[in-house]
Image (spheres, grey):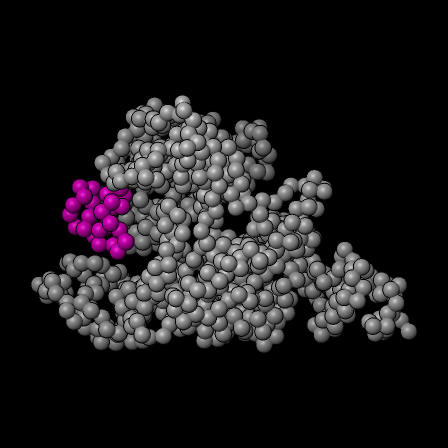
Amino acid sequence: MSEEEIAVEQLTEAQARGELARLARVLAEADAAYHAEDAPLMSDAAYDALKARNAAIEARFPALKRADSPLERVGAAPAEGFATVRHRVRMLSLGNLPQDKKSKITPPEEVHKFDARIRRYLGLGQADPLAYTSEPKIDGLSLSLRYEAGHLVQAATRGDGETGENVTANARTIADIPERIEGAPDVLEVRGEVYMSHADFEALNARQADRADKLFANPRNAAAGSLRQLDPAITAARPLRFFAYGWGELSAPLAETQMGALERLAAFGFPTNPRTALCDGPRALLAHYREIEQARATLGYDIDGMVYKVNDLRLQERLGFRATTPRWAIAHKFPAELAWTRLEAIDIQVGRTGALSPVARLAPVTVGGVVVRNATLHNEDYIAGRNSDGQPIREGRDIRVGDWVQVYRAGDVIPQIADVDLSRRPADAAPYVFPVTCPECGSDAVREPGDSVRRCVGGLICPAQAVERLKHFVSRAAFDIEGLGAKQVEAFYRDGWIREPADIFTLEERFGQGLQQLRNREGWGEKSAANLFRAIEEKRRIPFERLLFALGIRHVGEQASSLIARHYGTWEAFIAAMDGARDLAGPEWERLLGIDGVGEVLATSLVRTVTEPHERASIDRLTAHLSVLPAERPDVSGSPVAGKTLVFTGTLEKMTRAEAKARAEALGAKVAGSVSARTDLVIAGPGAGSKARKAAELGVEVIDEAAWLDLVGGR
Ligand code: IVH
């Protein structure tokens, strides 16, 4: 009888060893054929049977487990680097409940406020039932797993939420992630967190130490470093785990509730977190939070808080999303971690907008598993012990070089200084004197009334500002030029090759001939120079909103850029409008202020910058090299309100104002706060006052809520 026919219980140790060797070979061949050559050698059932046999033998003879055990599958290695994957449904992050500035604790009322906000948005009364799931917030990295016809076909990291890295081969090595699932929708994207347990993390670091390899700072870094390995064999050797908590694209709904969906994911074979609870309101959420906070140290893996999600998936859909976070979920973080250390120096950094930012240089200290050497001190008032209104903070205690200070960090946030211990202050410690000139260019550094920040007035002549603006220009959410990061920008600036954004696009013209100059630079080969020129070339076509954000205009962030781009459509229309608004008055100025989400501060900064002659010349030099793509508008074909400007006023009864506004915007309408000659339609509920009167005066159409619901297809 050959070994493969002997029942596992009957195998001798020698036979078991031989059988494991055979299974390793056969399964490896099957894996290679399946993943790399796309030509399976055996049926799924036969494959599963061999794996089950392998598992049974390993269970009976744990000492015989092979280093290349097929149970720690390795797929085919990706060719070079990671390919990128565009997420079909964006991977968003979560908003956080606010924390108290001093204690770093979230006041319990915030949970009640979150519930109240959701009720208000949905138009629910206090007595209406509204359930939430409360799930531990796993401190790892998120992963999206795509299954088609029950087979794992792709795994991708979150990346920037829109595109991530293709880590399929690595994900296949994670035992918690099933290769095949049954009874699932045809297309199913499962989302969850990859993490490492405390025990596995310690064992890994012990192994790393034995081999004099680098140690990981904490389990999260270890998990990220292990998943993002080009060689899946390395990932396979690192014990990663997975919890499923969500989904992306689906060809059929999973369930009607979050809890039901989690149960289905569990039934497909995904681990879901056993400490998840269904709560009937904020009180129950808080009780569960306290329970898990108590149990935190015994879980065996890191969590950094709880996540609350509206349980009813229809309500989740109605609540929808803000720019980057869902309205139907929120993170309730545990208080940040604290440590005391000595403040050795205060350095001043000059930012993109000229802001002088004080940075604390600290005696290195471990806070929550990470070594901290620097922390932000915010601004001169913060150091002096007062807030921007002149009110005392830290009971007025100032911070001096030589002091013992309390450092805290919360997740990815830059470490901060929370407090100072006066009893340990050295006798010779002097109050910190904040500079009134720019340490980089010597220009005056001034504080405008009402601004907590002192700014260098050097503008384009200040090298620090110029470099920071360039770094911002090439950053990920802006031009995102591969091979041109902060380090390269600094070097190119220092050598005078790139002084302003336009110079990036003439780099090849000026230095590309023979690539001689670039090639001679340290760290640059012919290939990297050619790659850089190609990457730059690719970015000559740039979406309007990215270009606007890339300019780094004060107060004009990513969200504002996209609002403005969507409003004006084309770059030319936008520039003409800015010129029209030059005097901060007139119809173009009013139109700019009419964009929902654009206030006076933003609008002033935008118009002043774009019409300032030096800035404008620099922008024009840049756009001469670009073709600016018009802003993408949502698909609103057939929408009766696309492109129209609406105003809601009075009380709405069927939906809340916020929901009505979100709905109108999704249909391509602009929602303004006040009625003007540009308003196309006013929706007036009971109690509408001056806005409805103004509309009548201007001859703008006014309809009631019922007519509005008819118009947009009811609910
Ligand atoms: S839901 C659109 N649930 O926390 C909602 N996220 O700070 C997406 N995380 O990016 C997230 N545990 O990586 C959700 N039970 C949980 C989670 C969880 C950990 C992570 C996730 C997310 C990050 C946001």
223 to the left or right of 94: right
Q: What percent of the width, then of the height, locates residue 299?
A: 57, 59
Q: Residue furthest front?
A: 423
Q: Please tell me which residue lies in front, 558 or 474.
A: 558
Q: Quadrant of the N terminus?
A: bottom right
Residue at 61% x, 45% y: name it.
216
- Compared to residue 458, the image places residue 338 above or below, namely below
- Compared to residue 32, the image places residue 355 above or below, namely above
- Compared to residue 50, the image places residue 332 above or below, namely above
- Image quadrant where residue 359 sits: top left
Q: Quadrant of the C terminus?
A: bottom left
646 to the left or right of 554: left
Q: What percent of the width, then of the height, locates residue 433?
A: 34, 26
Residue at 86% x, 69% y: name it.
11
Residue at 15% x, 58% y: name it.
676
- Image quadrant where residue 683 sits: bottom left
Report the span colored magenta: 580-608
Q: Please tell me which residue lies in front, 351 or 643.
A: 351
Residue at 86% x, 72% y: name it.
10
**In magenta stretch: residue 7:** no
Q: Please tell me which residue lies in front, 360 or 5.
A: 360
Residue 554 visible somewhere in the drawing: yes
Q: What percent of the width, then of the height, locates residue 177?
A: 62, 64
Residue 89 visible somewhere in the drawing: no
**In magenta stretch: residue 604:** yes
